[in-house]
Amino acid sequence: MSPDAVRWRYRGTAHCFGDDLEHDAHMIPFEFVIRRVTEPAELLPHLFEAVRPGLAARMKAGDVLVAGQRFGKGKAHIQAYIALKAIGVAIVCESLPYNTYRALVGLGLPFMSGCEGVTGRVADGEEIEVDFGTGEFINHSRGTRHAYPPLPPQARDIIELGGTEGVLRDWWARARAAEHGGRG
């Protein structure tokens, strides 16, 4: 697997939140949005500092953020999602606003929404495994399994290419190849 390849199966620690986790108030201080900071190294120390200081330092690749309804509510800013992607954390939630859905797909961050009751099936710190392609949700700490709606294939295709930027890179490469008779 190339270093940039998307992981569709995550196994790690669950970091749980309830309903109404707001991007600008809870996930990252608004000052980083105003300043349009997009460097993960600058964002990471401030991820969740308002609601759970030090959490970003404990998160690792393969971990899954589990949230209730209206995950990422408010404006669909991307700074917190940039930081989560840099760590290698994916998201499972009960629901999220459409603009947050678009932001996650556009950034290329694996997630599943529509996972009704997920917050009752896992506690903070439990070991879980999630397959974003099939919707399989396993709580290894409890020895339970549950099936959720997987991420739609169209969204997976965009995420697989690296989000909006990857789609545009792919389109440009194909256009140039066609222009040059398939010689790139």
Image (spheres, rainbow, N blue to C red):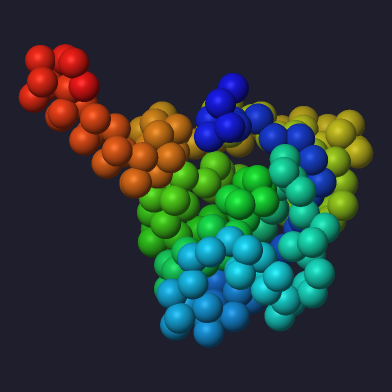
Q: Quick check: can you spot residue 72?
A: no
- Estimate the x, y position of residue 141 in percent, counting from the top left: 91, 39
Left or right for 35, reference 72: left
Question: Which quarter of the figure is the N terminus placed in?
Answer: top right
Residue at the farthest top position? 182
Left or right for 179, reference 138: left
- Estimate the x, y position of residue 10 in percent, counting from the top left: 69, 35
Of 24 and 93, nearer the camera is 24
Question: Which quarter of the figure is the C terminus placed in?
Answer: top left
Left or right for 42, reference 108: right
Of 106 and 21, nearer the camera is 106
Q: Residue at x 42, y 57 (%)?
A: 103
Left or right for 1, reference 108: right
Q: Residue at x 34, y 46 (%)?
A: 164
Location of residue 119 with respect to 182 vertically, above or below: below
Q: Residue at x 29, y 38 (%)?
A: 169
Q: Quick check: can you spot residue 4?
A: yes
Quarter occupied by residue 179: top left
Quarter occupied by residue 70: bottom right
- Estimate the x, y position of residue 109 in percent, counting from the top left: 52, 46
Of 8 and 113, nearer the camera is 8
